[in-house]
Image: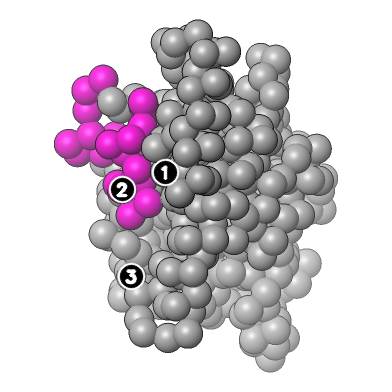
Amino acid sequence: MPALALADALTGRGAGVSFIGTARGLEASLVPEAGYELDQADLRGLERRLSPRFLLFFWSLFKGSFDSLAILRRRRPDVVVGGGGYVSAVPVFVAAVTGAPVLIVELDSHMGLANRVLAPFAGLVCLSFPIPGKTGEKYAITGRPLPGRLLTANPDEGRRRFNLNGDLPVVLVSGGSLGAKSINMACAEAFGRGRLELQLVHVSGRRDFETVRRLLQEQGADLENYHLLDYTNDLPLAMAAADLVVGRSGASVLEVAALGKPALLIPYPHATASHQLHNAQWMAGAGAAEVIEDSELTGSVFRERVLALLDNPARLHQMAAASAALGRRDGAERIADEVLKLNKRMPDSGARTLARTKKANKQLDK
């Protein structure tokens, strides 16, 4: 997760790092496993329709604010970093109103609701993508914090990990952690029959895995070269081994670019503010990707577009070079630089901590 990549970059500079999160999210296991302390608060996402969870959201605004205030009083941070999303919204807002320097990170090409609300309170907003209208001293384009295991992944290790033949091209197909049904079914229809002259690493997600597995069996798929997985922790290695990456176009396109991989992108059509389409167009405009609209995706279209690229090595080479030119591999280091600069720009650390503690005490007294 990007937050852990940034934490590693900061600890590498000698900073102490801890997290605020919930007991329900992935951070509950990932953060302690990575060796960082996690303070838990009652935080919930905004429920956009009337339901019992709508009332729980308002309760969490109240309870989560006091939880966050107590954590910040105890930790006395020199800088508070928000990564977007509901988990960061309340703690970052509480930090800002109690006087702590705040930096927020936008991981996508569209600023989410939490970051739009928090931006006026932040000393700096670090952007993963250029965003129209988000310029000036308030904003810095730093790139996305990327995990070290992605940056060190190499093709040979990836081929060994997934038992891939070095003589055949490799295509990675992935629709994200949950999977993408339209991509899963199109891939199985396109390449799930007969002998393959390529190798597929198809990460379907757990939701559709059994459906895809049964379909491949019924169609007599070449299971020697069609590697179907429900999930893998080694996706960076699969990406490193791939000659072509096929999938959605969320912020993961920055990981594709960091490895200099050509891509065939199918944007999720219901993404907020069409940000996946914008991400795909950003890659395609630079010559690093081609795009298929989800509404046009069929097995035959999928097969035709994949084979057309594999049959044109010169085109793939050009796309790979364009992708590498877009890729920012030092996003975590850049953001870590900005965090430390923000700390240095603020008044004396001891005086600032005392001022924040007084403000926090006043808030609790209320």
| Image mark for residue 325 | none
First of labels 1, 3 by sequence position: 1
- Frontmost of labels 2 and 1 is 1
Residue 220 image position (x, y, % from top left): 70, 84
* Residue 223 in the figure: left or right of residue 182: right
Q: Where does label 2 land, which residue? A: 117
Q: Nearer the viewer, residue 80 or 8?
A: 80
- Frontmost of labels 1 and 3 is 1
* Residue 350 in the figure: left or right of residue 231: left
Q: Where does label 3 land, which residue? A: 270
Residue 117 image position (x, y, % from top left): 31, 48
Q: Amino acid at mark 1?
A: Phe
Whether residue 129 appears in magenta in the rendering, the answer is yes
Residue 326 image position (x, y, % from top left): 40, 30
Q: Residue at x 70, y 84 (%)?
A: 210
Q: Residues within 10 Å of mark 1 (few under 14, many from 20)?
A: many
